[in-house]
């Protein structure tokens, strides 16, 4: 049990660290977007690199923030039945949903995207737009994002399983354990 909790805590700590990076990315993309708008309207200047940087940062926020959102139970859920169940029933739905829906989706996306990402990295793919950015880093970020989401899914499976076994309690509003 301690070994599994250690793995879960390490994953949770990594997720929190990535979440802090994502918070700063939100500020950065906001400043970049405002700067792009000011440059375009005040100075009639636009750059494909700046626009693509905006898109890339926006993508990173969602890709790398997904695991953090899972950890803090921020994903959209259908509460019609879930909210009426006792805590143990909710935990079972969380466990089965993570095992049978989240994890297969993560694996499928990783398996299907890896050849595309590997080829993009191999050829050092660039934007087709003049002055654009390299494409391979954002494609690689897709794989990293789903690896992070999958790791957080593993952490959730560990915590929920231990809670169902009566070894730990976890807070309802976030999947953080209370030992």
Image: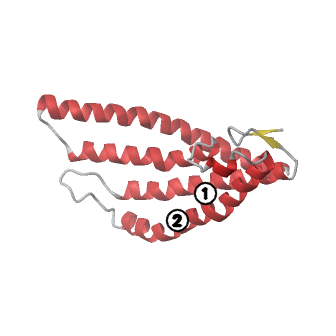
Q: Are marks 1 and 2 in contact (CB under 8 Å)?
A: yes
Count of number-bearing discs: 2
Numbered label attached to residue 150: 1
Q: Is the C terminus in the top left, top right, bottom left or bottom right quadrant?
A: top right
Give the left or right position of residue 91, taking residue 74 as reference.
right
Q: Identify the residue under disc 2.
A: 110
Residue at the image position 33 percent from the left and 57 percent from the top = 135
Task: Provide residue 91's location: percent of width, then percent of height.
Answer: 75, 51
Badge 2 crowding class, 10 Å Cα cut-off, few under 14, some 14 to 19, many 20 or more, is some
Residue at the image position 51 percent from the left and 65 percent from the top = 109
Give the left or right position of residue 55, taking residue 170 as reference.
left
Classify residue 171 by image quadrant.
top right
Task: Provide residue 57's location: percent of width, then percent of height.
Answer: 38, 44
Of the image marks 1 and 2, the number of the one nearer the N terminus: 2
Query: Element type at marker 1?
Result: helix
Q: Work out whether residue 116 or residue 38 is closer to the camera in this orientation and state it.
A: 38
Classify residue 150 by image quadrant.
bottom right
User: How does the figure colour the protein chain or chains?
Assistant: secondary structure
């Amino acid at each position: 049990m301690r070994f599994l909790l250690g793995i879960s805590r390490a994953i949770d700590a990594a997720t929190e660290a990535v979440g802090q990076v994502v918070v700063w990315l939100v500020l950065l993309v906001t400043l970049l977007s405002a700067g792009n708008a000011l440059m375009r309207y005040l100075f009639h200047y636009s750059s494909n690199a700046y626009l693509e940087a905006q898109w890339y940062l926006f993508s990173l926020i969602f890709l790398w923030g997904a695991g953090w959102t899972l950890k803090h139970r921020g994903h959209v859920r259908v509460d019609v039945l879930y909210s009426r169940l006792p805590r143990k029933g909710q935990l079972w739905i969380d466990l089965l949903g993570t095992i049978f829906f989240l994890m297969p989706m993560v694996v499928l996306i990783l398996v299907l995207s890896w050849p595309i990402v590997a080829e993009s990295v191999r050829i050092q793919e660039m934007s087709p737009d003049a002055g654009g950015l390299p494409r391979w880093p954002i494609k690689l970020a897709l794989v990293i994002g789903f690896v992070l989401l999958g790791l957080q899914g593993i952490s959730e499976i560990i915590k929920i399983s231990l809670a169902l076994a009566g070894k730990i309690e976890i807070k309802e509003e976030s999947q953080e354990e209370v030992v």
